[in-house]
Image (cartoon, helix red, strand yellow):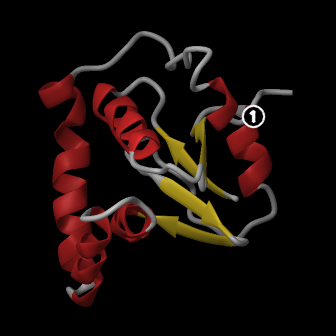
Amino acid sequence: MAVVLFDGVCNLCNGIVRFVIARDPHAHFRFAPLTSTAAARLLKGVAAPEPGPDSVILVDEGRIFTRSDAALRIARSLTFPWPLAFGLVVLPRSWRDAVYDLIASRRYRWFGKRDTCMVPDPALRARFIEEP
């Protein structure tokens, strides 16, 4: 099971979670907000950079991926044509992360944000890691 940790109040991030769910027919991914206790449990004791609110983190088979690496690895597991995006991994990470950071730093201005984390509807609830 792979887990995507995301900014739960960001409209763009919530839209991307819904996008991934719609293109992940085998339910490879589960989800949790970065600020959740589930995220803290997953990252506890793992040598990972401190997640900022503008990061997406993919936890997959005990490995941690952030920013553009996470986004491209997520795309690789979706239905066609999205795995083709993984080809961008040949670009230097500094270039990919610069584009990622540009979008991430403006996401609230461009897409807005919610006052609270997204609450999944009953049909999506099984794809989210529950709080203890």
Q: Nearer the viewer, residue 130 or 37?
A: 130
Residue 90 drawn above or below residue 54: below
- Is 64 left, or right, of 87 in this rendering? right
Q: How many labels does the image show?
A: 1
Residue 45 drawn above or below residue 86: above
Quarter of the figure with residue 92: bottom left
User: Which quadrant of the rendered structure holds the N terminus?
Assistant: bottom right
Q: Alpha-carbon neighbours of circle 1 within 10 Å: few (<14), some, or many (≥20)?
A: some
Residue 71 drawn above or below residue 110: below
| Residue 13 screen position, x and y as percent | 36, 36
Q: Nearer the viewer, residue 108 or 132?
A: 132
Residue at left 74%, top 39%?
38
Residue lying at the far right in this picture: please name it. Answer: 132
Tag 1: residue type?
Thr
| Residue 105 screen position, x and y as percent | 23, 43
Quarter of the figure with residue 110: top left
Q: Element type at marker 1? A: helix
Residue lying at the far top in this picture: please name it. Answer: 115
Query: Label 1, on which residue?
Result: 37
| Residue 70 screen position, x and y as percent | 44, 64
Residue at left 60%, top 68%?
64
Residue at left 47%, top 51%?
24
User: Which quadrant of the rendered structure holds the C terminus?
Assistant: top right
